[in-house]
Amino acid sequence: MSMNPVSGQRDIDERRLVDGVVSHLRGDPATDARSSFEPGIEKRSTNSAQRMAQALRGTFRKARSLLIEETERGSLFVASALLFASGAFLYFAMRAPLEHWQLIAIGTPALAIAFVRRGRMSGAIFLLLFAMLAGAATAAMHVAFRNHQTLGSPVATVLTGRILNSERLGDGRRRLVLSVVETTRPELRYAPDKVRVTIRGGSSEAQAGEVVRLRARLLPPSGPVRPGGYDFSFNAWFDGLGAIGFALGKMERVKIAPSPDMAEQVKARVNRLRETIDRRIAMVLNGPSAAIASALIAGYGAAIGDDEREALRVSGLAHVLSISGLHMALAAGTVIGAIRLALALFPTMAARYSIRKWAAAGGLLAAGGYLVLSGAAIATQRSFIMLAIMLAALLCDRTAITMRNLALAMVLVVLIAPHEVIGPSFQMSFAATAALIAAYRSHSLWQRRRHLARESRAGAGLLNLPVRFGAGILATTLIAGAATTIFALWHFQRVAPLAPLGNLLAAPVISILVMPMAVLSLLLMPFGLEAPFLKLMGEGIEAMLWIARFVSEISPPDRAGLVAGQGVMLLTIALALFAVLQTALRWTALPFAIIGLGLLGTGERPAGFILDNGRAVALAGAEGTMISNRARLSNFVGDQWMAALGAERLIGPQKVVEPSGAPMIARSDERFFCSERLCLYDPPDSLPIIWLKYAEDRASWCGRAAIIVIGDTTQPKAGRCSTRSPTLTIDRMDLAKHGSAALWRKEGGGWSVSYSFKDMSMPWHDARRWSRPARGLPDWTPRKRDTSGDKDKP
């Protein structure tokens, strides 16, 4: 094999393919001719069974030859990387995953068989099996080797900690990440190692690396608000966060010796630099422009308002807020273009040396600096790895954007952070990139087969440049949007119908104005010359927000509700087959895609949800409404529940004085009716749904209600309803142990319940077993200090 200097791809000897594969498929011509004339041998089969057998043998031989060709083109490596990531995904998705030593014990024989049978089909199959087991073992080892404390129950304590990061919020507050030094009043026996605290005012002068003391209300990281929803405790555990909370008073500085951890000192210095950049941006810009500029430059996006986030999400521009591949590519591309333009002014140097490689090296250094200054979040690390591999390929005279490079980036990301594979960011990022590479590869092959490359280059004049630029943006948006919509539906139950329009209008602003000005302002900030460029960046951000608001106003409803998991799985398999395979075998993705699309909308939606604290219940109502016993839900809970139920409007409860009158009133209006001790919803096709504040009121409703939700655990011995009763009882102890619940209607009538997790075996859920509700205890309240004798003291 030889290397084509233009395309950078491996050339395949066509004669070997013809002699080896084609002749194997068609058979020996001499044998075929001899069999035609020799007596007793008929060329054609005499019956349909023989003809079918011959067709099957021919299909098998053709498939085998195509698989061999796929192996020669490097598809086996790409498939191995995909299964490596799939193994990590299956480890986290399984209810009871295997230990890492068990996975290694199973994977070692698979690797041995793959080595012995190398070069054969069976060897490739065992290699793929080993890749999947290795991915699961990698995830298991990351879980096994992490060890940090997580808070079990809410508590108020005096906290002393070293500031690791300080982020400005939009309403004058700041969010601090503290490394806990000590806790007092009370002293926590199992204090978390790292906490995140929100504080009002007084913290603007405190910087990363300093030690502060404050009284704070700490809470355990919350679990998912519905089964299958986003689990904050999972991500918090991998980030090392053991608790979150808010300050109850003022913060004071404490003089303590610097941290002996060199890595922590370096992080503190970098975060102080990021805070300085954030303040410099706020001196020039204000409002949403300042918040978004800080998110794009320093990685601080907490100050962005809800209205701006919603407009960007509905218009398909939410990806702009997270520093990802787009931002890395634009930042590095700006530096690469500037270096090449500067070096091109010296013709002798440009002719003698490869300034293209010099520019690529400069772009790689710029991307690395951008990674550090933006906070090095996991999503940013993933984007940097992908860009670094592609720029390294350019330095080695190889094609930058290939599926092999993407597969290598996937392996490195899974090795660094295997828990990312179950998140939407990882899935949508790699899905979009793989779809774009596969589409570009297919388009290039189509052009080469029809000899259109020369004509398209000849006709690409200056006048066609805007048209080609717009067509490229539109095609990129459609391809990437189609690939990511699968996972957006699964994770968020929402889509952006007008995302192509939003990206088509905003992409020029982001590519030409926003990101280049961000790079220039950052480079000139040490000299105090950043203001003009930040103002230009702010104008670009305002234009982007105007586009987002315009598109969101004309966008149709975007809530899709829960979709069928089988359909998502089949569509994911279809995308993987089309991206990995390069021969005619890639069209095997078509039946998976068709069946997956057919199944997507067949998933059963739950009838309602119960929050894990036992205080909030919501049920799907008529005409896109959601009925709840709470007048207001938190933004996150309400958005998650309404998106899953496909609802657009929340109907709160109506207050009544006498609980006994609630059933009669409930028949005339579809909503909860609440008194001081209970809330009641009486659907027309079921027994009432009851929420009780106290467990002692349960007995009077057994047999009279379809579901009883109990919001306290003070009387765990009050007893459940009889097993012969149609009443389904759910108390706060169940919710504390198994997380938020979903309610389902049975086909023959009645109700069933499913919880977020079966048990507390995973370490990010282990602390729940020590919570007071899980142990049948009431919420902790501080004792009031007895001051009756103080007046007698001198």
Image: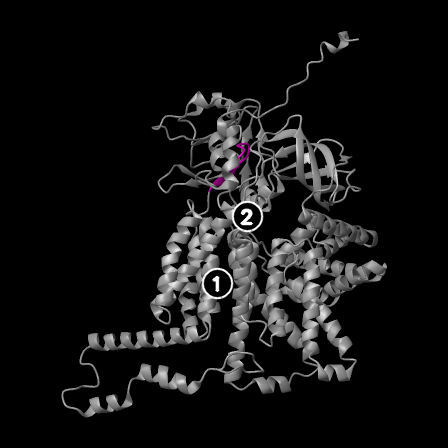
Closest to the camera, between mark 2 and mark 1, is: 1
Residue visible at 62% across and 57% down?
A: 381
Residue 352: percent from left, percent from top: 72, 84
- Give the colour scheme shown: one colour
Residue type (three-letter) at the residue carrying disc 2:
Ala
Residue type (three-letter) at the residue carrying disc 1:
Ala
Residue 522: percent from left, percent from top: 77, 60
In the foreground, 520 or 543: 520
The residue carrying pointer 2 sits among few (fewer than 14), some (14 to 19) or many (20 or more) residues within 10 Å by Cα, namely many
The residue carrying pointer 1 sits among few (fewer than 14), some (14 to 19) or many (20 or more) residues within 10 Å by Cα, namely many
Q: Which residue is mark 2?
A: 643
**Residue 462 picture quarter:** bottom right
Q: Examine the rendering and report whether any part of residue 662 can be seen.
A: yes
Residue visible at 37% across and 60% down?
A: 110
Residue 614 within the magenta-colored segment of the rendering: yes
Residue visible at 52% across and 69% down?
A: 404
Q: Which residue is mark 1?
A: 81
- Give the answer, above or below, for where 188 lies relative to 271: above
Quadrant (top left/top right/bottom left/bottom right) for the C terminus: top right
In the image, is 46 to the left or to the right of 321? Answer: left
In the image, is 591 to the left or to the right of 325? Answer: left
Segment tinted magenta in the rendering: 607-619
In what element is the residue under mark 2?
Answer: helix
User: Distance from label 2 to label 1 (Cα)?
Assistant: 33 Å
